[in-house]
Image (cartoon, rainbow, N blue to C red):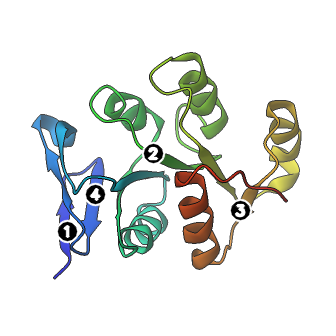
Amino acid sequence: MPRHHDVGMMTTRNAGTGGAAFGRGGMPCLTRIQPSGARWCWSSEDEKAIGQLIADAISDEPGFTAIHVAGAAAALEATKHVIPDVLVLDVRLPGMNGFELYDHLLRQPRTAHIPVLFETANTGDAAEEFRRRGIATFVRKPFDLWDVVSYVKRLAQGVPLTS
């Protein structure tokens, strides 16, 4: 039976491949309750329903656990506790946008290696930012949820995405 944990900033759902241990303030603890080889993914999205939908779909995949992290500040704080295998970032996040979060993560040795899949509602505004950073693949809202899951699985396996 799937388990849901909603602690305000982060939500996790897992369909039996492991779970997450949450510490004070809803941040995941350093210890993962996951089988060896399981993949950890975050969906950072300001619209809770979309972020949760993405996290649920990824968590339904064997060997994957996903959480919804509501915003860039929560994502940065969470990287102090757990380093995900893949990030799904919305371009438009409150406060620090997805590009700023991405740039910050690239500057940190602990997080520079994390593959990122961007999602955006407006590719026109984001196109130059994608080009400048060498980002070739992203998903445009509305997107096919199974495309997102497929991309996340490929990124977690180290398979580069191309347009």
Callout 4 touching callout 3 (CB < 8 Å):
no
Left or right of 132 in this view: 10:
left
- Apparent side of residue 156 relative to residue 3 in the rendered image (left or right): right
Amino acid at pointer 3: Val
- The residue at which mark 3 appears reads as 139
Q: Element at badge 2?
A: loop
Considering the image in quadrants, where does the N terminus appear?
A: bottom left
- In terms of sequence position, does the residue under pointer 2 or pointer 1 come before the other? 1
Label 1 – label 4 distance at C-alpha: 7 Å
Q: Secondary structure at mark 3?
A: strand
Which label number is shown at residue 4? Answer: 1
**Disc 4 target residue:** 11
Q: CA distance from mark 2 to mark 1?
A: 21 Å
Residue 47 x/y as whole percent = 48, 60
Residue marked by disc 2? 85
Q: How many marks?
A: 4
Q: Are marks 1 and 4 in contact (CB under 8 Å)?
A: yes
Q: Residue at x 60, y 45 (%)?
A: 116
* Mark positioned earlier in the residue sequence (2 or 4): 4
Q: Is residue 96 above or below residue 90?
A: above
At mark 4, the secondary structure is strand
- Give me the C-alpha separation between circle 1 and circle 3: 26 Å
Find residue 133 and report its horizontal and vertical position in percent. Answer: 79, 32
> Residue shown at 20%/62% (left/top)?
18
**Which residue is more in the foreground, 128 or 112?**
112
